[in-house]
Amino acid sequence: MLNLTQKERMLLEDQKSHEQMCIENYTEYAQRAKCSELKQLFNEYATTEQQHLDSINQILSGTVPSTGGGAQQQNQTPTFTPSNTYDPQDALLCKDALMAEKYVSGAYNTTIFECCDTNVRQVLNHIQKEEQEHGEGLFNYMKSKGIYNPQ
């Protein structure tokens, strides 16, 4: 049974609220998105964010969740059909989601550094890596559709 410090509990409660907001946003964005590829991406991310929330809740209840063990699946970077046209609303949803992923990933960084238990750190590192992969997926979608052109 984990014995969390007051600071750990406070930071984990913050991460819990971030995950809840991500689930709500991705679910709503999937409904609002015009592009079928983007709808699918948002739905996948909502599912992953629910897993993150479940893990945070487990930690807050005093247990360390598994991150998948030895048969951990490799997260595949999605590929998108290139296009020079995009819906402006889809672009706005992507930009908002990417901004949120940047914030949430940074907040995980702080939480990880404040955790005493190595196993909890590993779980949070796993979640943070998936948040960064969400950011990469959004970035790649935006780049493929001409929403973002890194130069």
Image (cartoon, rainbow, N blue to C red):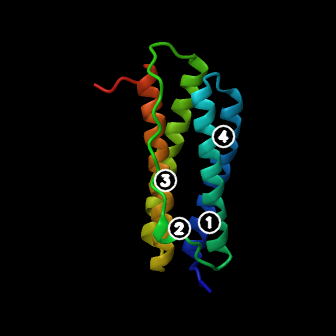
Disc 3, SS: helix
**In this rendering, the label closer to the viewer, 4 or 2:** 2
**In the rendered structure, which amino acid carries the disc numbered 1?**
Ile
Disc 1, SS: helix
- Residue 109 in the image: x percent, y percent? 43, 60
**In the rendered structure, which amino acid carries the disc numbered 2?**
Thr
**In this rendering, the label closer to the viewer, 4 or 3:** 3
Q: What is the CA distance from the residue labelled 2 to the residue labelled 1?
A: 12 Å
- Residue 46 in the image: x percent, y percent? 64, 46
Which residue in the protein does label 4 denote?
Answer: 25
Q: What is the CA distance from the residue labelled 3 to the residue labelled 2?
A: 11 Å
Which residue in the protein does label 2 denote?
Answer: 67
Res. 130 mark: 3
Res. 56 mark: 1
**In the rendered structure, which amino acid carries the disc numbered 3?**
Glu
User: Which of these two is toward me, 147 or 75?
Assistant: 75
Q: Is residue 147 visible?
A: no
Res. 65 mark: none
User: Which of these two is toward me, 128 or 69?
Assistant: 69
- Which of pointers 2 and 1 lies earlier in the amino acid sequence? 1
Asked if 67 appears above or below 141 in the picture, the reply is: below
